Amino acid sequence: MGLRSFLHRITAPPLSGEQMNEPCKMVCVVNQSLKMGKGKIAAQVGHGAVMATMKAGVERPAHLEQWFTTGQKKVCLKGRDAEHLLELEQQAKAAGILTTFVHDAGHTQIPSGSLTVLALGPEIEATLEEITGELKLL
């Protein structure tokens, strides 16, 4: 999908007529076992946020619209390792939450293909809390 098509899709009225009244947020869970530097973490979280936003524009436009309306809240949390991120992804999928993985290209600090971030949502805050409520802030 081109940028213009994406922008049109997220700014046009929802086709389904689905309306949401609860605040939404996005959660990015960072793989702490990789020992990434602050700049690397920021870049990887940025990739995750952009990818999750574009995915929501296609798959969950009402959630994306509500997320934009309620301030685009994003939270970064600590994940133990890649296995932990995979476990969280399975729990999120079972709860119907959009999931997006970020794998590093391997150009700088870490090996190519490393799982760096799991982005969840945008989703209703309470729904995300059920999956990520016990994780610590980054």
Image: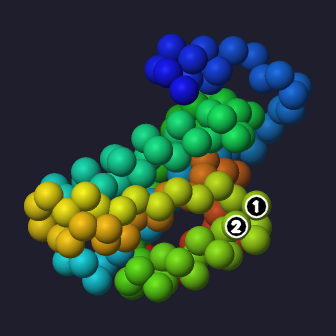
Residue lying furthest right in this view? 17
Compared to 67, does 110 lie above or below?
Answer: below
The location of residue 34, given as percent across then percent down, is 24, 78
Tag 1's secondary structure? Answer: loop
In the rendered image, which residue does mark 1 sit on?
Answer: 96
Compared to 125, does 57 lie above or below?
Answer: above
The location of residue 54, given as percent across then percent down, is 53, 37
Task: Work out whether residue 87 or residue 17 is closer to the camera in this orientation and state it.
Answer: 87
Amino acid type of disc 2? Lys
Mark 1 vs 2: CB contact within 8 A: yes
Q: CA distance from mark 1 to mark 2?
A: 5 Å
Residue 129 in view: yes
Give me the disc on residue 57: none
Task: Work out whether residue 114 or residue 95 is closer to the camera in this orientation and state it.
Answer: 114
Figure disc tally: 2
Tag 2's secondary structure? Answer: helix
Residue 7 in view: no
Task: Work out whether residue 85 or residue 26 is closer to the camera in this orientation and state it.
Answer: 85
Report whether 9 appears left or right of 28.
right
Residue at the image point whose x is 47% and y is 85% from the top: 83
The location of residue 116, given as percent across then percent down, is 34, 67
The location of residue 118, given as percent across then percent down, is 47, 64
Q: Quadrant of the C terminus?
A: bottom left
Compared to 80, does 85 lie above or below?
Answer: above
In the rendered image, which residue does mark 2 sit on?
Answer: 93
Report whether 67 appears left or right of 60.
left
The answer to which quarter of the image holds residue 125 is: bottom right
